[in-house]
Image (spheres, coloured by chain):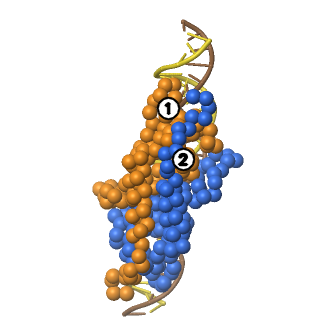
Chain colours: A orange, B blue, C yellow, D brown
Amino acid sequence: MVYPKNKAYDIDTEELARFAKAMGHPARINILRFLASMDSCFFGDICQELPIAKATVSQHLTELKNAGLIRGEIEPPKVRYCIDQENWEKANEAFRQFFSNIQSKEVCCNHEN
Amino acid sequence: MVYPKNKAYDIDTEELARFAKAMGHPARINILRFLASMDSCFFGDICQELPIAKATVSQHLTELKNAGLIRGEIEPPKVRYCIDQENWEKANEAFRQFFSNIQSKEVCCNHEN
DNA sequence: AGAATTATTCGTAATTTTGCGAACAACAAA
DNA sequence: TTTGTTGTTCGCAAAATTACGAATAATTCT
């Protein structure tokens, strides 16, 4: 995240951006859709759904985990993945609010104009 | 977009991913929020809102334009930017649908188990 | 014409992302 | 103990992202 030195953004702005970024790849959208359509499943099942190598799928899953959108737990010798319900709801709400905030109010043009 | 050779994703999966990717940076979230809070404004006004160089702001605006979320038109010597209402609604709907598709149905586990 | 304003483009650099195959680790089964 | 299954990690490469200052282009103002 190469942000400019000494500068930052609002905490909720960054959170929404993190959720969005995690969703910013078709493979990850597919993974989320797949997981959202069921209670849970194994890594291998997700792998089968995607046209990419398992190493790459594993990477995408890690990103989704880091964003908080999914969870995974070891169930030897497999790994079971599922949607993180709490953060999923959080993301849902964040996007909903974001899009609801459009209401053609007025032209900006502060300075004279 | 370094996708694997000869392979692709659903058209609507890619569209949602494109919207999400465009929103995947706090500066761009801020830009969109700012534009969504008014009818339209100039590049300079957007620039003032952000803690980054104008060259970088310009780049972010280009990305948002490419994703279809905003539009910009020259109004010499300024450039007026605004939300692209049509695609904004499209994105809103895409996200809404995406998140509504969660309904803990059943465990996957196709193969035996 | 010359100077000022506005925003994009250029050139460059550092970092991150995406992808793969091979190697590895952890556990179960034979 | 050896073998097999499952998924992560490693090492690498190519491309994309983010950022900046300087240069440029387009237009207006003097």
Relative horizontal placement of residue A24, taking residue A67 as reference (left or right) = right
**Which of the chains bears the disc numbered 1?**
A
Q: Position of residue A101 (x, y in %)?
A: 39, 70
Residue that carries the numbered disc 1 in the rendered image: A79
Q: Are marks 2 and 1 on the same chain?
A: yes
Which residue occupies the foreground of this view, B106 or B82? Answer: B106
Q: Position of residue B41 (x, y in %)?
A: 41, 78
Which residue occupies the foreground of this view, B96 or D20? Answer: B96
**Which of the chains bears the disc numbered 2?**
A
Residue that carries the numbered disc 2 in the rendered image: A37
Q: Position of residue B63 (x, y in %)?
A: 51, 64
Amino acid of disc 1 = Val
The residue drawn where x is 64% and y is 45% is B4
- Note whether A40 is above or below B80 in the view shown: above
The residue drawn where x is 40% and y is 64% is A98
Is residue B52 visible in the rendered structure shown here?
A: yes
The residue at the far left in this view is A6
Task: Give the position of the C terminus of chain B as an image quadrant.
Answer: top right
Which residue occupies the foreground of this view, C3 or C8? Answer: C8
Q: Secondary structure at mark 1?
A: strand
